[in-house]
Amino acid sequence: MEIIEKYGKEEIAYVYLGRTSKGNLVEFVESVQPPIPREEKWVLIVSTLNGCPVGCLMCDAGGFYKGKLTKDEIMEQIIYLVNTRYGRKVPVKKFKIQFARMGEPALNKEVLEVLRELPKTLEAPGLLPSLSTIAPVGSDEFFDELYEIKQELYKGSFQLQFSIHTTDEDQRNKIIPIKKWSFEKISSYGIKFVKDGDRKVTLNFALARENIVNADVIKKYFSPEKFLIKITPVNPTYSAIKNGLHSDINLKNFMPVKHIKFVDSLRESGYDVIISIGELEENNIGSNCGQYVQKHLITNDKIDFAYKLVCK
């Protein structure tokens, strides 16, 4: 792995722009969550594709797709980061590796090989792999294998997230403009996936004011015993601005404004609802979800409220 650029702050996060052994440009991230020390929680966010073919309305990585990364190229990102801190023995209590920087992981079966490889390569008792997906149509074999790997290697220590963003199917098709699993299919898979002692499957909403959300739809399809709800802001990206998406999260009290009844109704019905904000300074670093520093670097009309620490 050749590191081309590094942006960020030691006490929050770094974004790395690197070139893999195969010559692909990738972005990957390491972050902490102040005031929690790194030894308690350390998060790596790695790319699984070179760019992404999906083009979600709030994501800056769409439209730059150049192909799949190999197992070795994904592992190179992880190994580079652990070597800068600990070597192959990682004594972090919660060591989270998210397959969520560039690319939809279910479009690349090499991700499964990485999951098989990690326990062999790293001595990391706190390892918690985390896979975030839109569940594209045609990925059934990927998810069947993922279930088997979780059962074999990661019982109780695997985090699966489906990003759905809205409960309205027509709007969901606009926000995520490829064919994807229905709510019924996601529900069926989640019921199978979550066994005793496992983490619940996460349903993620990057919650814009413009998004349609109806708690009754969640209650219809998803059991609170198997699924939890995570609400995140729409982070400041070029794509979100272009597509007229405005975050519904009040950054003073960290609660939705327009969609507060959605959250209240779900909690009253027994769902775990997490409002996940993170460090706002990550917007300036370019390490938050949906951000893509390469998009910022090539854009002439730059936004002035994000990516401030990213410069040529």
Image (cartoon, rainbow, N blue to C red):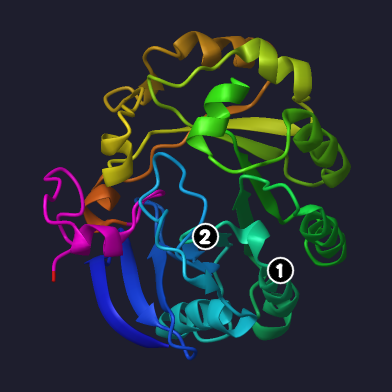
In the image: residue 220, left or right of residue 136: right
Chief SS of the magenta region? loop
Height in image: 227 above or below 257? below
Position of residue 257 measured from the top left corner of the image (x, y, whole percent): 36, 14
Height in image: 239 above or below 1? above
Helix, strand or loop under label 2? loop
Q: Where does the C terminus fall, quadrant-wise?
A: bottom left
Height in image: 242 above or below 261? below
Query: Residue sitting at 40 percent across and 60 percent down?
Result: 37
Q: Which residue is mark 2?
A: 103
Helix, strand or loop under label 1? loop
Q: Which residue is mark 1?
A: 109
Amino acid tagged 1: Lys
Amino acid tagged 2: Gly
Query: Residue sitting at 73 percent across and 83 percent down?
Result: 120
Which is nearer the N-term, disc 1 or disc 2?
2
Measured in 3D between alpha carbons, the distance from the residue under mark 1 to the one under mark 2, in whole angstroms, is 12 Å
Query: Residue sitting at 46 percent across and 43 percent down?
Result: 56
Quadrant of residue 268 in the image?
A: top right
Q: Nearer the viewer, residue 279 or 192?
A: 192
Q: Nearer the viewer, residue 165 or 269?
A: 165
In the image: residue 115, left or right of residue 248: right
Query: Residue sitting at 62 percent across and 13 percent down?
Result: 215
Residue 199 counted in the magenta span: no
From which residue to which does the magenta span run? 287-311
